[in-house]
Amino acid sequence: MLKKPVQQEKNSKRKLLSKEFKKEQQEYTMVVFCHLRWEFVYQRPQHLISRMAKDYKILFIEEPIGYNINEEGEYQLEIINENLHILKPRVKDIASIKPILEKLLKDSRPEVAWFYSAAFSPLLADFNFEKVVYDCMDELSLFKGAAPELMHQEKFLISEADVIFTGGKSLYESKEKHHNNVHCFPSSVEREHFEKARTNIPVPGDIENIKSPIVGYFGVIDERINLDLLHKTALLQPEISFVMIGPLAKIGEEDLPREENIHYLGMKSYKELPNYLKAFDIAMMPFALNDATKFISPTKTLEYMAAGKPIISTAIKDVQRDYSHCIPIVATAEEFAKQIKEILNDNKSSQTTGEYNTILNNTSWDSTAAQMKQLLKTKAQ
């Protein structure tokens, strides 16, 4: 679904292999099918699957779209650690992954097939998995450029799944109508990582040199962002710097609003995000209200909270109903500009911190992964 993979910083111990690898590396117990690149923005799949890898030996398969099929070798295998390998297929489509999987799983008896995208569901008929998990983090069929057949593929995947996890309440309400074993696991947070923004960590040079106050965003910049709202708010408040951090997907540079007080810093690694957050005076979630955002539960909500930053959001359903008591909800540029002024003029940090802590004390990626593992130990009811 993405235009191309984006390189993130690599662990020096990783190895990149083509075609063949040692027999002992083939004994996988979980196979993950994902539309996102492992090295793209670090989010739900990376958080959960890295934790699952403590108990499972995992083959994580990326969608083949965007890879150069003319390069030598039909795939690359990246070794993240002993229990987590990333398969990067260099083939024309998902169906062409089948012979690669037959080779890699020859000596394996995978217990779990874990899906993030139903586009991979045609492969289910070719392999015998004990359990099928659908971790539905987004309604991908509503995204820009989604294949017409994706909706039908999801219906098939739901019919085959033993258990469905959802990344938010709106998704849960949608999927529970079609399956009798659905569990809601909203986006969580690695709290200690983002709390670093409250400490004396350095601020990177490319944001340190931007005039404050700064209203900032990090994440994918695509059709889900209300660029018109961002542009109009920036025009209303030329004294405020608006900073967008993250890669572009499914839109181009020509789609971005350009003003002297709007800054695009590109993609940053997960490790660097607290350093950038430290420079934010206010964190924003300027999402458009469209089909692509109808069911989202933004991971960044809790990450912003862990950093202790005031947040302004548009009316995303899962944000509005769970967090509107501590996050102002705006619809227009005038409302957005007004909230920025009020936050900068009012000192309510202690109240906000207390409300954030109450929310953060009830969630973590470790807890979410542990609950999911427990559900996998039992057969679906």
Image (cartoon, rainbow, N blue to C red):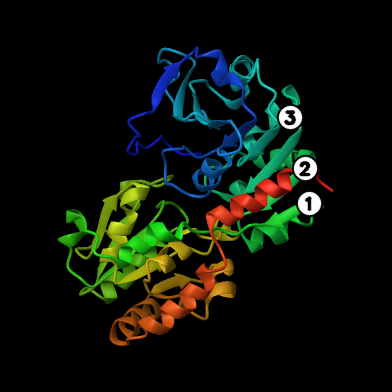
Describe the element under mark 2 as helix, strand or loop: loop
The answer to which of 138 and 200 lies nearer the viewer is 200
Describe the element under mark 3 as helix, strand or loop: loop
In percent of the image, x 60 and y 42: which residue is there?
116
Spatial distance from mark 3 to mark 1, Cα to Cα? 18 Å
Determine contact: label 3, label 2, CB under 8 Å. Answer: no
Which mark identifies residue 129?
3
Residue to which mark 1 is pinned: 181
**Crowd rating for badge 3 (residues with CA inside 10 Å; few <14, some 14–19, many 20+):** some
Q: Upstream in the sequence, badge 2 or badge 1? A: 2
Where 12 sits versus 162, above or below?
A: above
Query: In the image, what residue type sits under mark 2?
Result: Asp
Spatial distance from mark 2 to mark 1, Cα to Cα? 7 Å
Whole-percent x, y for residue 219 in the image: 40, 54
Residue 233 sits in quarter = bottom left
The mark tally for this picture is: 3
The answer to which of 322 and 54 lies nearer the viewer is 54
Where 336 sits versus 290, above or below?
A: below
Query: In the image, what residue type sits under mark 3?
Result: Phe
Whole-percent x, y for residue 331 in the image: 46, 75
Where 354 sits versus 4, above or below?
A: below
The answer to which of 212 and 55 lies nearer the viewer is 55
Determine contact: label 2, label 1, CB under 8 Å. Answer: yes
Spatial distance from mark 3 to mark 2, Cα to Cα? 11 Å
